[in-house]
Amino acid sequence: MGLSTFKKRTVTCGELRKNHVGKTITLTGWVDKRRDLGGLIFIDLRDRYGKTQIVFSPERHEGAHEIAKSLRSEYVLSATGVVRARPEETRNPEVTTGEIEVDIHELTILNKSETPPFPMDDYGDVNEDLRLKYRYLDLRRPSVQNNFIMRHRAYQVTRQYFDQKGFLEIETPILMKSTPEGARDFLVPSRLHHGKFYALPQSPQTYKQILMVSGFDRYFQIVKCFRDEDLRADRQPEFTQIDVEMSFVDEEDIQQITEGAIVDIFKTILNTDVQQPFPRMTYTEAMERFGSDKPDTRFGLEIRNCSEIAQHSGFRVFSDVVKKNGIVAGINVPGLASYTRSQLDILTDYVKSLGAGGLVYLRVNADKIECSASKFITEDESNAIAKKFEAKPGDLILLISGTWQKALTILGTLRLEMAQRLNSIPEGKWNFLWVTDFPLLEFSEEEKRFVAVHHPFTAPKPEDVPLLETDPGKARARAYDLVLNGNEIAGGSIRIHTQEVQSKMFSLLGIGTEEAQRKFGFLLDAFKYGAPPHGGIAFGFDRIIMLMTGSKSIRDVIAFPKTASGMSLMDEAPSTVDVKQLDELHIKIK
């Protein structure tokens, strides 16, 4: 069977309007819907630009009508006909082409299709694994295509913005040296250098710093990054960053450039005005008010610390924690004093699953306060706690005790859970927030050493440099994260640019001189030749598009994503390879 010949399209399926009436045109696309009224056959023809209703009449064009009888969903067509206005009562205002239809007199079936494994419309849920297995079909669906149209537009706005600001787009290597610190590297064996490996970059961090040493004072790149880590809804083994680095700058310069890019993207694509400057909040404040370093500030339910009241309590669970420098804190949930004992037991089990020892609750009624630990917490203490939380009759206070980090983190998760139960998270609101002054280091009990909170090249705040000698855990980083509606969408820092401070940082991280030279020697050597002060930021591009499109997972805005286990269901990657390929690499599978 030979290949079909066909007329090339003259218009797209989203293009025709009333001013085209009377014109002869050719459309190409896929059969979206078919309606046979016993005589006339109506087809909705679809391409990525839209849908057009085409009509086949047995009286006017018998040959085309005869072919149309065999049409089924997803058949590929070339159709030529005359545009005509639809009768008033049949017009469809929900479709851009809803005022016209095309009377077809010439039809070519370019390809037939088997019945798709799921409906091709945008209604109803389809199992995600099925969607990913047949991703080429899923990508035909208009809602999915719209995600990628928006993604494309965001690429163009980004490039135009940074070009206008004097940045150069410079590509960095995909095959690089393995410098593991944080997530695991993906390794690529070298055929020519037996026993040696390249790594896929977790980010272009070292390269963009070297570009600053090289005198390219404003760099950006839309770049693929790779991390071999456990996945979830907003993570993929390969993802896209807008990567930015600047020389002779401070935090404010980078934040202004970042805000400008965000404002430009949201205005151009969503026609939404984002107000500058974005609010700023220290890491400590974010944790103590919201229990998260990426707080969702669209709603209240803020955390309050009542350790001062609890430290003298006869309730040893509270007072002992405070004596050990822990905290007692909680949230006030309005209107939920009506929660039953069984509902509160479910909440208690929930916080225990997060690692809490338990949950103390106070139901604030008009005449009295009911406390779940009333045997140990006095009426005066309950009243003091209610006053601290500014509770009103009908409110429910939920309290947790523990170490500062653990108690606040659990409360942050509980806060989100209660907001979802109350349906109090507003839609259509964009709350941007800079979180600053992160800890520079945190101590890993597992590894018995300090690890970098961001990465080993993050500079300490100048006033905290002496703490590197005396109390490294208290040193703050010149780091900043941009948060949108409880999602981190960008993060960066001012970098260490002197060999002295960088060596001290490596020492604190347990990286000796020899190991530092082996892993990062090329960067340390570059610092010997006049490295300028510099800093940068990386935008999580997939996550930004996920939020802008209202998608629930970044898989919805990546053309060919992996599952939560890192599998590509469509092409079955990762897969086995021929023994010959392994032999060439001198690799043997155990």
Image: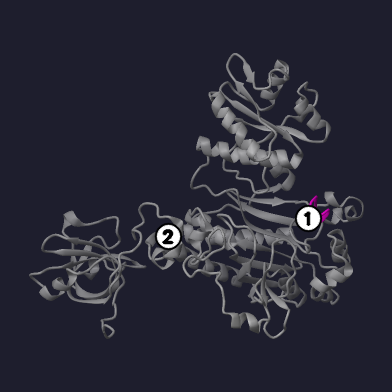
Q: Which amino acid, by three-letter code, is at mark 2? A: Leu
From the viewer's perspective, is residue 123 above or below residue 417? below
Residue 130 got which mark? Answer: 2
Number of marks: 2
State the residue at coordinates (9%, 72%): 60
Q: Nearer the viewer, residue 66 or 538?
A: 66
Look at the image and tell me whether residue 299 can be seen. Answer: yes
Label drawn at residue 477: 1
Real-space Cα separation, disc 2 to disc 1, in angstroms: 45 Å
Viewer-nearest of discs 2 and 1: 2
User: Residue 425, relative to residue 543: is it above or below?
Assistant: above
Name the image colouring: one colour
User: Are there few (<14), some (14-19), or many (20+) residues within 10 Å of tag 2?
Assistant: some
Q: Report the span colored magenta.
A: 442-450
584 relative position to 376: left or right = left
Residue 432 position within the rendered picture, expressed as x and y whole percent measured from the top left: 60, 51
Q: Is residue 297 left or right of residue 76?
A: right
Callout 2: SS = helix
Q: Residue at x 76, y 51 (%)?
A: 437
